[in-house]
Amino acid sequence: MTSSTLTVENLNVVYPSDHGKVAALRDVSFSLGRERLGVVGESGSGKSTLGRAIMRLLQPPARMSAERMELQGRDLLTLPDREFDRLRGKRMSMIFQDPKYSLNPMMTVGSQIIEAYQAHLRGGRAQAYRAAVDILASVKIHDPEAVMRLYPHQVSGGMGQRVMIAMMLVSAPDLLIADEPTSALDVTVQRSLLTVLDELISERGMSLILISHNIPLVATFCDRILVMYAGRIVETCVASRLSEAKHPYTLGLIAALPNLQLRRDRLPQLQRDPAWLAS
């Protein structure tokens, strides 16, 4: 791994409730180089909260604190909101799970990508238009100029995700966070989309955080994996050696995966240990 793109130390996120504070993230620490980092765990384990906390997209009453959070040595904790707004989208971008809720239904695809380009990069309308067409072509969209004129409801789910990827990459960020980018797509479209993403990451030398429930997908696509349980990172694995994981939670997740080669009456039930929260 090369020098760190992102460094996070003791990141915490809490929400107030009638029964006291609820911890969504608990002392999360990791570093990210020019690599593909997968984040896996059950729903509610803190995966998406982690991505949004890094992007500073959490809204009150959420309360975030950390000892250190830096992007290529730049302190993200003390950066004023206006400066962070300039950094978000230009140096770091996030792809959300469902384009239906992330794309503006009142604007054409082209207008949204052009807006993203002009918000972060210098250049006139013509230059922004050409950049939008080029980035759509790079995500393997056929006839990108025609797609530029479409509205989000006129594109398929797979094409909508390609549009989202294009919009997040048009400013050539150093860090890309992808939150379940293929969860609503069939297996064939998933594979095609990940191939495109893999090519773009390699060509541009970006760092990737891939948040997913799909453990086999993450194991084959990523370099390292963070396993999250109840807001904590309980294990870090080399992706190609996930089968050698040691933590009982990770082993439980792997054991619960369906296996067409192995007939069994029911999948094993994960037995939880309260000590995992303190580990």
Image (cartoon, rainbow, N blue to C red):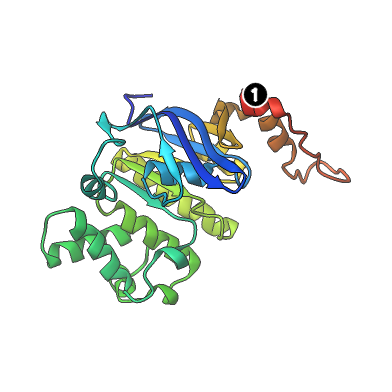
Compared across the picture, whether 210 is left or right of 257 comes to left
Quarter of the image for the N terminus: give it: top left
Q: Nearer the viewer, residue 68 or 176?
A: 68
| Residue 46: percent from left, percent from top | 54, 42
Instruction: Please provide percent x and percent y for residue 21.
Output: 55, 41
The quadrant in which residue 173 appears is top left
Toward the right, the furthest residue is 265
- From the viewer's side, name the closer residue of 199 and 93: 93
SS label for mark 1:
helix
Is the residue 70 above or below the residue 202 in the image? above
Front residue (pair 131, 237):
237
70 above or below 84? above
Q: Tell me which residue sits at (74%, 36%) in the image.
A: 255
Examine the image and state in which quarter residue 23 appears: top right
User: Which residue is at 53% across, 46% downward?
Assistant: 16
Q: Is residue 168 above or below residue 108?
A: above
112 lies left or right of 96: left
